[in-house]
Structures are given as C-alpha cells and as structure tokens.
Image (cartoon, grey):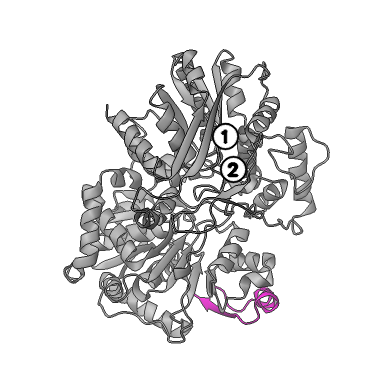
Amino acid sequence: MILQICRIIVKLLLTLRYRVRISGLESCLRRGKQGIIFMPNHPALIDPIILCSILMGKFHLRALVSERQVRTTLLKYFHRPFHILQMPDIGAAGRSGHDMVLKQLQTCVEALKAGDNLLFYPAGRIYRSKFESLRGNGGAARILEEYPGARVVLVRSRGLWGSDFSRAKGYQSPFGQTLMSHLKHLLLNAVFFGPRRQVHIELVEKPADFPTIPDRDTLNRYLEDFYNQGAEGNTYMPYTWCEKGGARILPEPEAFSAPEDTANVPVELRDQVYDKLREMSGKKILRDGDFLGNDLGLEGSAINELTLWLQTEYEQPPGSISSLSTVAGLLLAAMGESSASLPLQEVPMHWFLPERQDTVKLASGENICRQFLENVSQQPTRVLLAEQELGVLTQRQLLVQALTLRQSLQAIPDKQLGLLMPPGAQRLAWYLACLLDARLPLLLDTRIDLADIRQNLQKAKVEHILSTRQFRQNLKGASGQLAEFEDKLIYAEDLQAKSGGLAKFSARLRAVFCLRSLSRWQPHEYAAMLLNCDSPAAEFQALTHAELLDELRLALQKLQLRQDDSLLCTLPGSSKAGLLLGLLMPLCSGLRQVYHAETRETELLLRLTAAYRISVLAGDRQTLANMLRRARVAQLTSLRLLLCHNESEDPELLELARQKCPEAKIIPCA
C-alpha cells in the first residue's frame, strides 16, 4: 500500500513537467504480467522514475541499479521496499567486484524464472549523444544466455534527450542538484502552469527478428538499431510560461574527451599492453584511439580483467573504470597515470571571486573550531569547497554537514577515533565533526603501511577506525592492508543511515541561529594525531590546537596568500603539510579549496586547475612534474604558486615551470 501511494505521488509530481504518452502497454498486459525483462534505452536520469511510475502500477517490478546510485541518491532509503538489486561498479572492487557482478546477474535470472519482472538497462549508463551506445556491455546477453525462455519487452523512450537530467549539455549534474535548481521555476509557474516536455514511451514485445541466440555483439547491434530508430535531437523545453522561443532543437554537445597524449609511454610498455589487448580481443591492428568496447569488443568483465592485470603486472591500479575506455587510457593507467575521459560538472559562477590583493589571515579564536565558527558567522555564504561528486559547498553548508555527522558519532564511545578516507569534502566534514564532538582524530592514509602500526594503535588507545564502504571496496583489488583492521572498521554510511531528517533539521537551525553557543563547546585538547615518520617505531604524535595554528600562521606569512586565491592540494592527508593545507587552511582561513582524491589522474587534475582557475597548486615533486609535463599552457594561466612538498630547488621542476607557467613561483613546503 505504501509503495502504491509513493508511486501515485511521484506520478502526479511528474505531470508538472512531463506529458507522457505510452503505447504498447495494453498489448503487453494481455500477454501476462510475469517473468518479463524490460530492456529500455537510457536518455536521462529521469527516465527510470517515469518508467517505474507507469510499470509498477501494473507489474511486480524489480530493477538492477548501480550501487553508486543507491548509495548517493534517495534510493538509499527505498531500495529495500522496492526490492532493488545493486550492481557494483565494475573495476572498483577488483576481482571481488567481478564476482559480485556475475552473482547479481544470476540473481536476475533466478528472479525471472520465479516470475518476477526485471527492469534492466543494457547500456548501463545514460546517453552521451542522441544515440544509444551499448559499447561492449554483455549483461543482457548473459541473462538471455542463462535463460533463453525469458519474455523480452523492449522499451524505447523519446523526448528526454536535452532534458537537464541528461548529458545534452556535455556533462551530467547530480540528480538532487538538478531537481533543486528548478524549484524556483516551479514557483514562477504557480506550480501547475509550466511548459510540459513531451515524452513518448513505446513498449514492444520481443520482435520477430530478435536474435534467437543472442551473442553479445549481435544483440548489442540489434538493440542499438532499435533504440536509435527516429532518434530526436537535443530538444530544449522552456522552464517557465513566460520564456520566449518555445521548444527548439539545440546543437549537440561537443565531444568532451580531450586527445590523450601517449607520447611519453615507453616502447616496451606499449608493446606489452598491445600484446595483451591482441590476446583478449583477437584484433591484430590496434590504435591508441580505439575504444575498448565499440572497437575491440571488450565487455565489462573483460575490462575488469584488464584492471586486475594492471594491478598485478604494474602495481598501478587505475582510479576508476572510466579511465579504461580507450587503448590510450589503458597505456596511461599502466604508467600510473589516468586519462580524463569524463566531463567535468559545470562550475557555478558564485565560485569565482573578484580579484582581491589583501592577504588571507586567521580568524580570532584559540582553537580550530572557534576559528571556523568565526568565519561562518562573518561570511556564511562564502564558497569554501568544491568536489566533482558533491559540487560546491559554502562555509555554512559545511557546518551543517559536520553538525549532522556529529550526532552520528554519538554511537561511538571512544574519544580517539581513526579517520581513513580519501582527501575530500567528506573527510573534512568528518574531521570537523570529531573536533566539535570533543574527539581526537587520528589521520590515516593508505600510503602508510598500516600492517606495521597495529601495536601503536593500541598505545594511542584507538579502538575504531572510521572509513567508508566504497573506499574499502576500492582497496580490495589493490591492497590487503585493511584486512588487518577489519575488526576496527566502522563505516560512515552506517552511521549516517541512523541520522534522519530531524538531525539534519536540527543541524540547520544550529548553523543559522546558535553560532554563539556552538563557539562555547570545548574541543579535545589535541586537534589531530599523525604518524611520526622520523620515528623508527612508527609512533603517533598528538598535536595541539595552538601548535597547529602557530604553524598555519607561519605558513600564511610565508606564502602571502590572497583572499581571491584557490587551492588544489594533492598531498596525503596523513602528513603535516596535508593536514595544514588540505584541512586547516580552508577551515581556519576560509581559503577556497578544490579536492580530487586520485593523484594519478593527471589529465583530470589539469582540467580542474583550468576550470576552477586554481592559483595555488600543492603536491609532491612527482605529481607536480607529471602535471607540468602533460599540461597545455592555457590550462595553467591562473597559477601563481606551486607548493612542492619536502623538496628544495629542483632543476627539472624549475625548467618545466618556466616553460608552462613562467608567472608561477615554486615554494618548498615541509
């Protein structure tokens, strides 16, 4: 009953923007309501919601959904009652991820045999152009191979390419962010009087010419021909009744994949990679620009095998499976770098600040918490952080996140808590939550040999380590270190799931109205524990608020950072320099910070530098040198400072900087 009520509410809300016409549904119903695999095209993020609002009223429907979508969207609250099957991100979890994919596909087969209906997207991702492309995906073929008698209904959606939920702009914004951006249009239209996007959904029972023994390539070609029949252009539909111009076709988005420079790939490594690809694909002639799916016919499981091969052969796991879309991406991943095949999210205009020459100074306050709260009270809406997955956060938004997480920490009794997360806004929010809850965070990093420090964790009285399931899963294929700490790990997702809407509402109220009372909270005497690398016993060193603030003042005096500066820091969060620049600098000084956890993704780091107009770049010598070698001069025009960790004057780095960004100054940082 509750699910049906939710479906009706969603269907009514959809009518505020979409006028949906459906054909073939009655014919499908006449043939029965069980054991159907619905295989739709995927033009936008919104089409699964439209489809489910229609089909769930007639069929008992299950869906196979990306684990990441379940984790990061409202589905995390509804995946159980909706009986959603989660598909892990291929390649993110190493061999275990491959096994999980096969297990879930087998679960799909068993569900179909039991009479359940399955919503299965053969492409596994939304459109990159007005045409559907299944690449080398083999999930649909595998299901039909295991269960040839499955009843197949093809679903073709039209009218959604060009929606804000699509990639027709050249990039994909998060679903929630897109939804919230249009609330103002809803109000301007007095809710009910806005223009409607025309959507046509066509259900076609298994056609007569459907491949009888559908091998992957044959099935994919057939499905692409079916989905792309009469493909529509990039259709823009106005968002308010007063907007002029009406519905119109816009130009298709430009290709977002910049040419991947493989000139520096050693000949021996190139030969090894090419030999492996010839062995797996059967192709004799290969080019760097070939796509692993469309050109070489390698499906997800084969690409996962390549990931594992890279990890074993070169000990250089790529940051994500997206970097393995082309032969060039594979070559770069084998070198320990990564291509940048995905488009960046749009950078909001309020990220960019007018030029200001006055220097950055610390706020008043004897501890880090009060420094940050003083900044929030003075400029609550000042942009502070940017990350591709999360977008841009203001100082107040970060405080709301930290206060919400602080309530989640109540379930952990320990006063000392390990933090093992990749650098990013999430790590910063948890660090701040620990400080606000009077806890002492121990900052850990995968670059530390964790297996050697278990005894010292006992000495430091650290009984639990806070991490994330996704981060843990990403490490399974590349590192067995965390197996030593499985009994100590607590997952952030589990803690956050226990904090409901009331906790978030309370955090928002406090962030707006209770800053003065928050500033009276007393944090732990120490602000962080770090591994003392100079100690042969790998002991931990506790640092007080006063010590860290003194070091931060010295750094600001040395660097003379300006109010309009923005920082991209690639230093490990477990080092003192990483703590000062990556965590304390934005918290205490309000300096804008862009995060990206994977330092191997050189091309993406360069694109972030250009898109966010980064003026201060911090990293170790290798990361900075890789970026300067690969950079185009236009990507580095905003740089004025290069902060090189633990390096004195380096002739090669100086020469690269002179060629690519002559206006930038190199400064060693300890």
Q: Name the residue located 83 percent from the left edge and 40 percent from the top edge.
A: 285
Rendered location of residue 204, percent (x, y): 57, 23
Which mark sits nearer the N-terminus, 2 or 1?
A: 1
- What kind of residue is marked 1? Asn
Q: Is residue 435 left or right of residue 659?
A: left
Residue 86 visible? no
The quarter of the picture where residue 659 lies is: bottom right
Label 2: which secondary element: loop
Rendered location of residue 551, percent (x, y): 38, 78
Q: Name the residue located 68 percent from the left edge and 72 percent from the top edge.
A: 633
Q: Residue furthest right?
A: 285
Up/down of 319 relative to 610, above or below:
above
- What kind of residue is marked 2? Tyr
Label annotation for residue 583: none
The quarter of the picture where residue 8 lies is: top left
Q: Which residue is mark 2?
A: 127
- The answer to which of 231 and 337 lies nearer the viewer is 231
Magenta span of residues? 647-670
Up/down of 285 relative to 629, above or below:
above
Label annotation for residue 41: 1
Q: Is residue 181 left or right of residue 306?
A: left
Up/down of 667 relative to 419, above or below:
below
Q: Is residue 170 magenta?
A: no
Residue 144 visible? yes
